[in-house]
Image (cartoon, grey):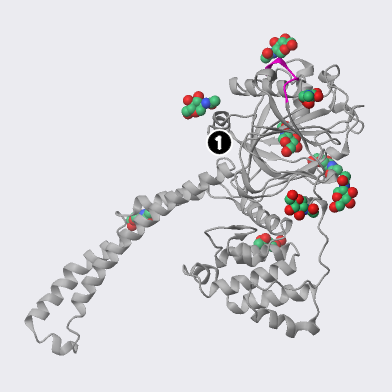
């Protein structure tokens, strides 16, 4: 491989670390790390597993029921004549039955009770699924996902627990144990007001829980939940106000708790994700047929989103058949965990989505798409495809980051220049969440199936443009599939026009 190509590749990889090997797990025998929470694709597989689990559990329950039914009948036949023992054995038929039963029946009954032929396979299968269940890190990510959904979109815990997400009413509800897990997590994160709300909801749900799971296995006594509620309140409040906290505890859980500490002001990112940026002045839309000869045949529906940073949104640039191929054909096994890294993101490596990158040539479809990018932008997109397809999961997001690495600070990273532009194709609609936002520029773009976002990360003088820093809002409802590609600057020196 040429040195240039190696460098190109390295630059490409620094934006997302690919962990193929997976981290060390303390959970023993797992062959390879399975992560579900960070991608809807993977979560669908987990649901498939649960469906199989339920099938086997149901078989097992049916077998047990048959057994219990038989044993009950047997028991009834024995207890029919419930009279004094001495009186009972005056009857020769009773005597003979007693001797024969205890000699002949009981060993059979005992063996029958112990036998597991009718459900052995089901139990084994159910046991095998344990190798494929989410690990504790996955569980923690799910908790973070719920945390983000609640805090970034400023939702009420009671609404969430009842499946009311903004204007959407979901046909589901959280269980008492779900709420308890979230409450404990919030408490651990020092989100004491939120924790208190979740404890109060758990308390409320536990009384009407149908499956009894909480009572049977988790055993939180109502007193414990009340205690945790009060402790959570006291973390931010004062012991003098204890009576008012006890009042709150007796209120219905749909009444939001007051802030004992000042309510934090929303960050620009939160404002953007909540769709509360000031309305943009006029947007420019037009059909563009000038870029390349191809465009004369298929004019582009082009929408100028912003001049600084320069952002364009192109409508209907992916065909349904292409999107079907891009998303449906990918199996979970083929996807790997995408991490942020601290070159471009302030915090430490954090899992975001699951991603598949075809390094080098990703095949016919990828080449078609890369050619289309050339047609759209008029820029040299290169003959390596290096297309990334990413799928987000439960409440997963991408913190604010830049796509450039800033060569002034990392000079050894870019013999071919910094990342000049980024193409982001939306291969699915998202019902709620998952917007691409540029917080410094007050810009928020909702994913729209088939459209593509294109922006410059560098100024005309090739210096990084901090306004191009962007983020992806936490996913809430739906399945976010994107396809992206960035290009280094040096190729474009003679192609890129200067924009005013
Ligand atoms: C079924 O019973 C046999 C004999 O008692 C025992 O060795 C085996 O572990 C049982 N299998 C299951 C799945 O319980
Ligand atoms: C809370 O933190 C403790 C100690 O760090 C940890 O053992 C526990 O698992 C955490 N619980 C949750 C729900 O995160
Ligand atoms: C932005 O525009 C929408 C519809 O055009 C309108 O409903 C909304 O009130 C506007 N928001 C602001 C802050 O002006
Ligand atoms: C998609 O999957 C089908 C069936 O598994 C296969 O025939 C086809 O080649 C795949 N397409 C791509 C682009 O991988
Ligand atoms: C970035 O990560 C590397 C290694 O993971 C670490 O050595 C370095 O201190 C981190 N930098 C920042 C700014 O966190
Ligand atoms: C068409 O798009 C290209 C590339 O984005 C741009 O340079 C050109 O100015 C556009 N033409 C029109 C008429 O908008
Ligand atoms: C990429 O383009 C270069 C020259 O422009 C050429 O030498 C090379 O073979 C091309 N590679 C592929 C995979 O098309
Ligand atoms: C973004 O919006 C805020 C008000 O919400 C305003 O103060 C700020 O100047 C805006 N920034 C830009 C770049 O438009
Ligand atoms: C994918 O898109 C995100 C923006 O959503 C960008 O930050 C990231 O660097 C891109 N990854 C690749 C491999 O292009």
Whether residue 293 is in magenta: the answer is yes
Q: Quadrant of residue 5?
A: top right
Relative to 482, 83 lies left or right: left
Residue in the picture at 55% in, 41% down: 31
Is 476 rendered above or below residue 392? below
Residue in the picture at 20% in, 85% down: 82
Q: Quadrant of residue 296?
A: top right
Is 417 rendered above or below residue 85? above
| Ligand 5 placement by image quarter | top right
Relative to 84, 441 lies left or right: right
Instruction: Confirm if mark 1 falls within 8 A of ligand 4.
Output: no
- Name the residue at the left extreme: 92
Q: Is residue 1 visible?
A: yes
Residue in the picture at 75% in, 24% down: 377
Whether residue 82 is in magenta: the answer is no
Q: Quadrant of the C terminus?
A: top right
Q: Quadrant of residue 376?
A: top right
Residue 182 image position (x, y, % from top left): 64, 63
> Mark 1 highlights which residue?
333
Q: Which residues are magenta?
A: 288-294
Disc 1, SS: helix
Q: Is residue 21 visible?
A: no
Residue 253 image position (x, y, % from top left): 63, 73
Q: Quadrant of the N terminus?
A: top right
Residue 176 image position (x, y, % from top left): 56, 68
Residue in the picture at 53% in, 60% down: 172
Residue 167 image position (x, y, % from top left): 63, 57
Q: For label 1, count other residues whose C-alpha is less than 10 Å away and answer few (under 14), some (14-19) or many (20+).
A: few
Of 272 and 490, nearer the camera is: 272
Q: How many marks?
A: 1
Of 102 and 368, nearer the camera is: 368
């Amino acid at each position: 491989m040429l040195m240039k190509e190696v460098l190109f590749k390295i630059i490409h990889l620094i934006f997302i670390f690919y962990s193929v090997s997976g981290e060390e797990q303390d959970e023993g025998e797992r062959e390879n790390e399975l992560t579900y929470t960070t991608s809807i694709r993977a979560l669908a597989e987990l649901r498939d597993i649960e469906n199989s689990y339920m099938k086997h559990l149901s078989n097992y329950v049916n077998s047990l029921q048959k057994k219990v039914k038989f044993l009950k009948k047997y028991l009834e036949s024995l207890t029919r004549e419930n009279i004094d023992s001495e009186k009972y054995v005056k009857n020769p038929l009773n005597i003979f039955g007693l001797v024969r039963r205890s000699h002949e029946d009981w060993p059979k009954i005992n063996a029958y009770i112990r036998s597991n032929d009718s459900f052995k396979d089901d139990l084994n299968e159910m046991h095998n699924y344990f190798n494929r269940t989410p690990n504790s890190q996955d569980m923690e990510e799910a908790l973070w996902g719920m945390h983000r959904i609640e805090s970034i979109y400023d939702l009420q815990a009671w609404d969430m627990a009842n499946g009311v997400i903004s204007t959407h009413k979901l046909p589901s509800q959280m269980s008492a144990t779900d709420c308890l897990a979230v409450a404990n997590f919030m408490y651990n994160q020092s989100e004491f007001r939120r924790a208190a709300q979740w404890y109060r909801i758990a308390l409320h749900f536990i009384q009407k829980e149908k499956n009894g799971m909480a009572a049977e296995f988790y055993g939180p006594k109502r007193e414990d939940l009340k205690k945790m509620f009060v402790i959570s309140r006291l973390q931010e409040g004062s012991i003098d106000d204890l009576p008012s906290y006890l009042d709150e505890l007796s209120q219905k859980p749909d009444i939001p708790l007051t802030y004992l500490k000042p309510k934090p002001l929303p960050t620009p990112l939160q404002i953007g994700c909540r769709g509360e940026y000031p309305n943009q002045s006029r947007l420019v839309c037009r059909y563009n047929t000038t870029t390349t000869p191809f465009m004369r045949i298929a004019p582009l529906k082009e929408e100028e989103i912003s001049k600084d940073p320069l952002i364009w949104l192109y409508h209907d640039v992916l065909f349904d058949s292409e999107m079907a191929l891009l998303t449906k054909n990918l199996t979970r096994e083929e996807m790997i965990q995408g991490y942020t890294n601290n070159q471009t993101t302030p915090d430490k490596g954090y899992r975001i989505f699951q991603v598949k990158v075809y390094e080098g040539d990703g095949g016919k479809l990828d080449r078609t798409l890369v050619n289309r990018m050339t047609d759209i932008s008029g820029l040299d997109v290169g003959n390596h495809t290096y297309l990334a397809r990413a799928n987000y999961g439960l409440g997963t997001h991408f913190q604010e980051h830049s796509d450039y690495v800033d060569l002034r600070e990392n000079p050894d990273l870019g013999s071919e220049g910094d990342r000049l532009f980024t193409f982001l194709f939306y291969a699915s609609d998202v019902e709620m969440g998952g917007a691409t936002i540029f917080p410094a520029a007050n810009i928020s773009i909702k994913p729209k199936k088939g459209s593509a976002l294109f922006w410059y990360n560098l100024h005309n003088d090739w210096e990084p443009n901090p306004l191009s820093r962007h983020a992806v809002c936490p996913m809430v409802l739906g399945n976010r599939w994107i396809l992206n590609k960035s290009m280094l600057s040096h190729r474009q020196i003679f192609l890129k026009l200067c924009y005013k």
